[in-house]
Image: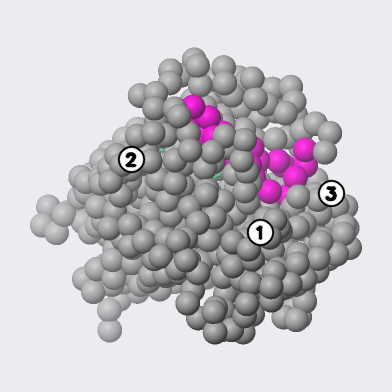
Amino acid sequence: MPEPLRSLLVVGGGTAGWMTAAALAHAMPRGCTITLVESEDIGTVGVGEATIPPITLFNETLGIAEADFLKATKGSFKLGIEFVGWGRAGHRYFHPFGTFGKPFDLIAVHQHWLAAHAAGEQTPLDDLSMAWGAAKRGRFAAPMADPRSVASTFDYAYHFDAGLYARFLRRYAEDRGVVRVEGKVAGVDRDGESGDVTAVRLDDGRQLAADFFVDCSGFRGLLIEGALATGYEDWTHWLPCDRAVAMPCETGGDGFTPYTRSTVRAAGWQWRIPLQHRTGNGYVYASSHVSDDQAAATLVANLDGPALGDPRFLRFVTGRRRRFWNHNVVAIGLAGGFMEPLESTSIHLIQTGIAKLLAYLPTREPDPIAIEEYNRVGIAEFERIRDFLILHYKLNAGRSEPLWRACSEMDIPDSLATKIDHFRRAGRLVQRENDLFGPPSWLAVHVGQGALPDAVDPLLAHVADPAASQAFVGKLATAIKQMAHSMPSHRAWIERIGAAA
Ligand code: FAD
């Protein structure tokens, strides 16, 4: 029998470090000492406020009540992302959480919409999404369980203050025995024979030894790169943004929206994330197309309310570590790789990194099969998300700025080209193993950015005529509208469930 782990060290106390420590403390209540080392002097990346629906499961698994979490993190609900100016100037669309309506016989709802649209129907695809029905009216309520109700067809995630979330999880982890060490890692010791990491050394001479290490040290990747030189795959040629400038502002008027907004700018795009006490904003941009000063000026000129604080600049290289698990080190969070926050996927990748770590939990002797599978699945998860992000850039073809012209003309990965071809032919939404974003998400971006297919699914002609499709679309849009009107406002719901900060 392989010997179970006796000690594990998490290096770094940002969102990744504390999510990892909290989840491990919950899953491994005995037999293994869990320590986390972090440096207040170095601090955390300090951004990362929007998430996707699986985050609700993370909290639920840890037994964290939704209202407690939202109150502690001054969080809000997120029904999806509104994309403004993507596809062409002056245009907007919504990437909803959930589906577009419910299945209609054998044919996907969007095939009816495509047929109806070709016959002159004016209802936008967005209006067939319950998430958008509620979002555009500033409404929110928990989805209903009854599958016959249109209110069962949406899902949700959160916006929250990531610093407060890390603090909340720190309390959770420390209550369950995680030992926190304040200190700066200055060196890493490795076994002369196996090359495994044996300990990290702090700048005051202290040494922290462990059987296994989780590198959550952020972009630095102190162990995975600094000590083990694992290597990095750079995807900047597909996703050219390499910097961001962030600046929160006051939330004015009815700006407390239950959704994130992404607005195209000349050299990238701007995020808007409403929390209970402020609105988070940032401009993600390609430094080859705009200077830092120009980017900051653009951001400041496009805030909803008075700025809170000075602009904060961040630099990154989009891509992933060649291996996430190397020797007795797993890299989780920014230490493992980073893709820009267009679809709010980084915190989710922390979550899947933790889930895989538990699924392939190391013992004191490394198991090469477990390591191989961890890396194989992790790489596939990164690549599927990468393709979905590139889709947005590739289809942003109606813009005249040099960055966007170059993106619409760039070569794309074959895995993505195949999916685009299938949609173009007959509106088919092909799925692949480890796809995080399902058919409704891909549909939203294809249609939202104006890439309509050449034909509909040939099966439709055997099932319904365009008039029937049009009637179906109209009925669904009406049901969604009525349901949305019956929901409380976003703020009223937060107050009702006791989540107001
Ligand atoms: P960090 O926050 O950088 O934490 C690193 C930790 O390591 C810190 O505690 C630091 O003190 C410690 N450390 C480093 N070096 C040492 C040392 N020598 N000794 C001791 N300790 C050390 N994600 C989303 O899901 N949604 C979003 O909307 C989103 N927006 C983003 C926008 C931008 C511009 C960027 C750059 C990222 C965004 N992210 C987003 C990603 C998200 O911020 C990160 O995934 C998340 O915060 C995890 O960061 P981390 O914990 O890996 O790293």
**Which residue corresponds to mark 1?**
120
- Disc marking residue 491: 3
Q: Earlier in the sequence, mark 2 or mark 3?
A: 2
Judge depth for marks 2 and 3 and give the one in front. 2
Can the viewer see residue 409? Answer: yes
Alpha carbon distance from label 2 to label 3? 43 Å
List x then y, in percent, for residue 460: 55, 78
At 73% from the left and 35% from the top, the residue drawn is 278
At 75% from the left and 58% from the top, the residue drawn is 133
Alpha carbon distance from label 1 to label 3? 38 Å
**Farthest residue toward the left?**
193
Q: Earlier in the sequence, mark 1 or mark 2?
A: 1
Report crowding for label 2: few under 14, some 14 to 19, many 20 or more residues within 10 A (C-alpha): few
Please tell me whether residue 112 is drawn above or below residue 282 in the rendered image.
Answer: below
- Asked which secondary structure carries label 1, the reply is loop
Magenta stretch in the rendered image: 255-276
- Disc marking residue 409: 2
